[in-house]
Amino acid sequence: MDESVQADALRAALERGPFHRALTLAVEASGLSLQRLQQRLADNGVRVSTTTLSYWKHGRSQPERAGSLQGVQVLEKLLRLPPNSLTRLLGEPRPRGRWLAADRQPEKFGEFFDDSEVAERLMAELGVPEAQQLRLLSSHDCVRVNPDRTLSGHTSRLVVQATADRVGRNYFLHATGHPPRIVTMSRTRHCRVGRVRTAPEAGFVAIEIVFDRVLSRGDTTIYEYFLETGTRDDFFDRIFRHPTGQYLLEVEFSPEAVPARCLSYRRPKPDEDRTDLREVWISPELVAHVAFTGLSAGIYGMCWEWE
């Protein structure tokens, strides 16, 4: 496309939209690849995968979360566009969150991740049913912190009840972090690992968990697994898409990595601040634990600080 024609097309798109066309023309005019653009966004503190950028360019999705909207503002600077020229094309965000009708469907997997499109794609590849087939009654995570302050992984024990007939599997989505890390699920009890799908560019792994028996409506089962992560994090949390009865989180610290303090917290959404911060006691055995009861959908966990 001739440069003058390209400039006219970009001006028209910035004036009238739609967002994806304006973004596409602006990226083409900059001469930057999506990989290079993603790196410059990361340099400015914005983490967006190349897959998400591609989705934005092709109109398959558009930025809505606070972190994504911040990314659009940074994009405007990187692409040398007038302030708010892309942002104004986004319009009003779709309704989301707890203010929707009380009988709404449970939160989707992607609702709790910035790269929601990638998360939803992975779960769709595993064939996750839209209707809820399992009710989570309780969950118990045991996390081990190594001497070098990395997490060796966590052992999880879950109790679920079938809300439909012929239910034989559940699904697990894990954010491996940036840069992405290899995670391994092993040491299973009452289940086995089924299909696995990964999206390294977004830092996700989706795992199918196959029970040792098929459940009928009302049946319960217990299953356990160990997820080896090796991440260097100062927190651990779990996402709950549905209301849940109980969540018990234990964190065991190595003697060489005892923190100055631990705090429990919850977050309604990943782009919202931690709330309900409460100090957690570290026992003489160097174990901190928190028990949440009557959980609503959201993110619950524990963080710690070293001096």
Image (spheres, helix red, strand yellow):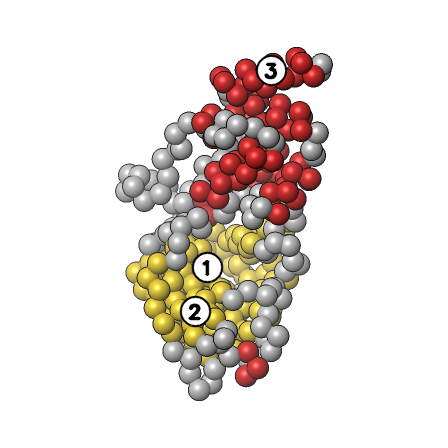
Q: Amino acid at mark 2?
A: Leu
The quarter of the rendered structure image containing the N terminus is: top right
**Camera-side residue of 13 and 20:** 13
Instruction: Check disc 1: other Cα within 10 Å, few if <14, some if 14-19, many if 20+.
Output: some
Marks 3, 1: nearer the viewer: 3
What residue is shown at x 67% (from left), y 29% (from top)? 30
Provide residue 138's location: percent of width, then percent of height.
Answer: 39, 63
User: Which residue matches tag 1?
Assistant: 238
What residue is shown at x 64% (from left), y 54% (from top)? 179
C-beta proximity under 8 Å, tags 3 and 1: no
* 53 is higher (above) or lower (below) than 46: above
* 17 is higher (above) or lower (below) than 170: above
Provide residue 298's location: percent of width, then percent of height.
Answer: 39, 53
Q: Amino acid at mark 1?
A: Arg
Specify the quadrant of the image occupied by residue 40.
Answer: top right
Q: CA distance from mark 2 to mark 3?
A: 55 Å
Q: Amino acid at mark 3?
A: Ala
Q: Say what secondary structure mark 3 lies in.
A: helix
Where residue 9 is drawn, which disc sits there?
A: 3
> In the image, is 265 to the left or to the right of 11?
left
Specify the quadrant of the image occupied by residue 41.
Answer: top right
User: Which residue matches tag 2?
Assistant: 249
C-beta proximity under 8 Å, tags 1 and 2: yes
What residue is shown at x 41% (from left), y 45% (from top)? 107
Instruction: Check disc 2: other Cα within 10 Å, few if <14, some if 14-19, many if 20+.
Output: many
